[in-house]
């Protein structure tokens, strides 16, 4: 008998994410980078300023948690905060030069990891998988 969970989409997505991410998360740890720091750097890379709220949404975190993370990254010289050009109330977070250098290296690692994860699929299948997941995010 098949368990309900074995064919339950949300469970399958969570398991697939955990399995696909585990080795890369280990690589990040070896580099002394947390997953949350990686998500922030990747969101801002290469030149995509974002508000704290946008980063929180993109990085799967609460806004208050994201504010503390941004504080730490700013203190480490990896990001900067700037007043928005169009809206003075908006604070934009950007990569600082040290953050861009780190993100350059990490995105190469991430791309190589992604290639390994998708290596068993054809290019068309990989594109279809990404399109299907993107579709879930836009519904």
Image: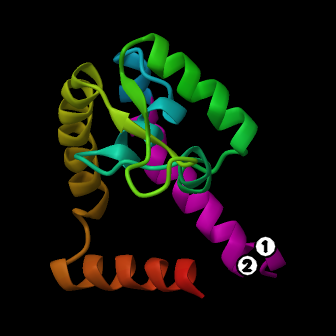
Please tell me which residue is depicted at 73% across the width and 78% down the height of the picture: 8
The color scheme shown is: rainbow
**Coordinates of residue 83 in the picture (x, y in percent):** 45, 40
Q: Which residue is mark 2?
A: 8
In the displayed structure, would residue 138 be above or below residue 107?
below
Specify the quadrant that holds the N terminus.
Answer: bottom right
Q: Find out whether the residues at labels 1 and 2 contact each other: C-beta distance under 8 Å.
A: yes
Q: Which mark is residue 37?
A: none
Tell me the CA gap for discs 1 and 2. Answer: 5 Å
Please tell me which residue is depicted at 54% across the width and 17% down the height of the picture: 72
Disc 1 element: helix
Residue 64 visible at all: yes
Find the magenta span and give its range: 1-25
Question: Does 15 appear in magenta?
Answer: yes
Q: Which residue is mark 1?
A: 5
**Coordinates of residue 118 in the picture (x, y in percent):** 28, 64
Query: Could you tell me what secondary structure mostly forms the magenta stretch?
Result: helix
Disc 2 element: loop
Label 2 packing within 10 angstroms: few (<14), some (14-19), many (20+): few
Please tell me which residue is depicted at 39% across the width and 27% down the height of the picture: 80
């Amino acid at each position: 008998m098949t368990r309900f969970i074995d064919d339950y989409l949300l469970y399958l997505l969570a398991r697939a994410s955990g399995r696909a991410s585990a080795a890369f998360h280990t690589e990040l740890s070896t580099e002394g980078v947390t997953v949350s720091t990686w998500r922030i750097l990747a969101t801002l890379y290469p030149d995509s300023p974002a508000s704290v709220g946008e980063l929180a949404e993109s990085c799967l975190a609460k806004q208050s948690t994201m504010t503390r993370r941004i504080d730490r990254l700013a203190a480490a010289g990896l990001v900067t905060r700037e007043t928005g050009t169009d809206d003075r109330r908006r604070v934009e977070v950007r990569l600082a030069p040290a953050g861009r250098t780190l993100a350059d290296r990490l995105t190469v690692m991430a791309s190589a990891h992604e290639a390994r994860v998708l290596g068993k699929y054809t290019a068309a299948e990989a594109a279809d998988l990404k399109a299907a997941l993107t579709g879930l995010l836009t519904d």
